[in-house]
Amino acid sequence: MREAATRTAGPPAGGQVMAAEMAQQPAVLARLAARADAGAAAVRAVAPAPLAGVMFLARGSSDNAAVFGRYLAELEGGRPAGLAAPSIYTRYHAAVDWRGYLVVALSQSGATPEILTTCQAVRAAGATVIGITNEPGSPLAGAVDLVLATDAGPERAVPATKTVTAQLLLLAVVAAALAGNPQPQATASLAAVPGAVATVLADPGPAAGLAERWRGIDRLVVAGRGLGYPAALETALKVKEVTGILAEGISTADLRHGPIAAVYAGAPVLLVEASGPAAADVSDLRVLLARRQADTASLPVPAAVSETAQVIAATVRGQQLAWALARARGTDPDAPAHLTKVTVTS
């Protein structure tokens, strides 16, 4: 009797909150896509002219979203874009001239001390600051020139899911605004994002199967290139958070240098694939990994949508994989050990 119960019990309880919040993503994204044109107009109204450059300010999952924004802003806006280092202001108290720059600060809680301090510093030094947050009434609202709310509703699971994909879509709105095109076509492709994510959520099988195959791993490489690189970073973070597996997100170009030495026969590698100029690099890496006899896999995303929509869908695939791996390994995705929802850094 005891053996029979063991065989049929399945994974332990847990993960229902994260799963429910993942399932809310199409509705959240649909709300944001519906007001994308208004959001782009608001960004255009505050953006410096001429625009010197764009910098992104974030931590954690928001930092991975910021990498996505950095790519899109430079591609669409035609000005240099990069990631700000909060310690320059919170620890080194540097004096920097920010005139002509747009700074985009991302904080799900809107309350991270170092994000607030840095926003205040760069704004005082001449920057225009946009805040992207799930809490429009948070302290961040008082430290920026414009708030773009993710409008995702309360997120109770420790791993961020719906707030991350909402940030990704809003970053695409910001990039469309910087392109200088006031026409609706600038944000039209975003209408396909909710459907692409819904398609992925309705098909959990690929992630579940890969989680079963990899349930015993102790390390994982997640590689992507171009717009797919931020999805690789976020997938690796989600796997680390909910399973404790040492997962590293890396660009395919960087992996081909020194880190490839750590990819031995049987080593698990997840490739984030999307259409676009970087797709050939991922294909080339797959060939190299096959020669090294790595255990290589990828997860499907809808094909008939833009590269931006595919990357957001790939981010959701990463959430699915992390959730399924945690369940397969007997851990609770909702409340990973030693983590809290809000990490206070200063």
Image (cartoon, rainbow, N blue to C red):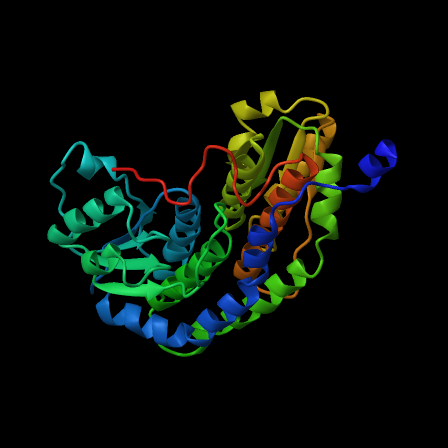
Of residues 80 and 322, the one nearer the viewer is 322
Quadrant of the rendered structure where residue 333 is?
top right
- Total marks shown come to 0
Q: Which quarter of the figure is the C terminus placed in?
A: top left
Is residue 25 depicted above or below 294 in this figure? below
Furthest residue in direction bottom, as rendered: 183
Of residues 282 and 2, the one nearer the viewer is 2
Q: Which quarter of the figure is the N terminus placed in?
A: top right
Residue 1 visible somewhere in the drawing: yes
Q: Position of residue 234 (x, y in %)?
A: 50, 44
Residue 51 placement, left or right of 337: left
Furthest residue in direction front, as rendered: 1
Quadrant of the rendered structure where residue 150 is?
bottom left
Of residues 91 and 227, the one nearer the viewer is 91
Residue 25 placement, left or right of 149: right
Of residues 112 and 50, the one nearer the viewer is 112
Seen at 33% across and 70% down, the residue is 180
Quadrant of the rendered structure where residue 60 is?
top left
Q: Position of residue 17 (x, y in %)?
A: 56, 53
Q: Position of residue 87 (x, y in %)?
A: 24, 35
Is residue 277 depicted above or below 173 in this figure? above
Is residue 291 depicted above or below 153 in this figure? above
Is residue 38 depicted above or below 332 in this figure? below
Q: Position of residue 223 (x, y in %)?
A: 57, 38
Seen at 36% across and 64% down, the residue is 149
Residue 225 visible somewhere in the drawing: no
